[in-house]
Image (tube, rainbow, N blue to C red):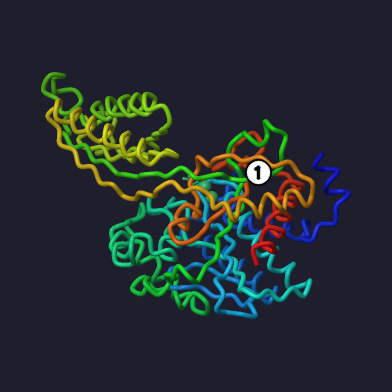
Amino acid sequence: MESNIIQNMDFNVNGNRLWNDLMALGKIGSGEDRGVTRTSFDQDDIKARKFLLNLLEQADLDPYMDEAGNIFGQIYGKNPEMPAILIGSHIDTVNSGGRFDGAMGVLMGVEVLRTMKEKGIKPDRTVKVVSFTDEEGARFDYAFVGSTALSGTIGAEKLKKDLASAVDGNGISYLEAMKSASLEGGYFSRINPDLLEQAQLRKNELKAYIEVHIEQGKVLESKNLGVGIVSGISGGEWAEVTISGEAGHAGTIGMAERKDALTAVGECLLAIEKIARESNGSVATVGKLDVKPGSGNVIPGRVDFTIDVRDISDKRRENTITKIYDSIREIAANRGLSCVIRPVQSVSSVMSSSMVIEAIQAALQEIDYPIHELPSGAAHDAMVMGELTEIGMIFVRSRDGISHHPEEWSSFEDVALGCEVLYRTTVRLL
Ligand code: HGY
Ligand code: MN
Ligand code: MN
């Protein structure tokens, strides 16, 4: 069905141009396993930012960067007082991730604006594309930095404090990384972690935020659909836990005398899994463990680990988290170990706005494409933007549901279709 649409329909957007940009951006930070690694403000993230800025310049979209390092392109509206439409996503990746997660949504925004320019469309309201700083949080274990700054959800002072204490594996703090990125000069000069409040938008500055993203699941594939409408996004809470016991010689300390931090964590992992399973809706993940001192013949004295809990229901998520934290404290206490739980970030779930959903539905009807709504289990900048403005998302089918992985893939046809739907949706919302 889709291939008929591609062949028979006059697309406004240029699918080939978009695809070429996507493949070119995917080469930046590409490793031997063809996985892409661009973590915030690392060398390849900087290169990718320059690539995007160049694309925006070529398209005459007046690029700029804000204090948080968010990159924008724009077409000015005839009436700059009217709230703008913002389209966006992110170009940072997880470690050894794919070419589509984030990058596709940003480049689609560029393609939509480029197409509008070529068609000579002069909108009443301003329309912008944004590439948010650090959606993934892969380098500093702190995510949604750009969208948090823009929407002001936690306030600039709290964000600055969080960024001051976020450090990467080499002990470089977020603030230091931002400051050194600003030394790149040009557009980068405006990056300034001391002035994050200046990146914040006021509620009346935006009419809506729209994001296109790969689904990262198998729903659309199972329904044989190239695109779908996101009904809402699961909220999440992220925390770091430290369990401290006593390191000691693996041969000389008897089992009864040990204060092994890692065996306690083993118990915690199973408890976390059980609590999430029994919640009937929450998902909980421990994805990172750091065992110290980390020698085969030494009893682990300290373990740091991360917790990631998601749920479409905020109430159920909070309930799951409380149970998880209580159970970790209990396990540590029963073993005579100490534990510290540091909640790092928390974002509420968000429902898509009916105004944006209706615009996407109308866009799909125009091209005679089936309408299917689905929720997002993955987090997106749209979730954070939902606290500032009306949001909506379009999902593009993922091959085998794979993402955050070198094999992440969406077909040329689906990407072109997703972009065309975004174009038609945007024009409607203007
Ligand atoms: O973690 C997430 O859900 C997203 O991919 N940032
Ligand atoms: Mn991702
Ligand atoms: Mn993403």
Indicate the quadrant containing the N terminus: top left, top right, bottom left or bottom right: top right
Q: Circle 1 sits on which residue?
A: 228
Percent position of residue 224, x then y: 72, 34
Which is more toward the observer, 421 or 94?
A: 421
**67 versus 166 height, above or below:** below
> Going 62% across and 34% down the picture, which residue do you hit?
219
Can residue 47 be seen in the rendering of this structure? Answer: no
> Going 13% across and 19% down the picture, which residue do you hit?
254
Amino acid carrying mark 1 in the image: Gly
Q: Is residue 66 left or right of residue 35?
A: left
Indicate the quadrant containing the C terminus: top left, top right, bottom left or bottom right: bottom right
- Secondary-structure class at tag 1: strand
> Going 28% across and 62% down the picture, which residue do you hit?
161
Where, by quadrant of the figure, is residue 197 drawn? bottom left
Percent position of residue 115, x then y: 74, 67
Which is more toward the observer, 402 or 298?
A: 402
Which is more toward the observer, 320 or 91?
A: 320
**332 versus 356 height, above or below:** above
Q: Is residue 39 left or right of residue 308?
A: right
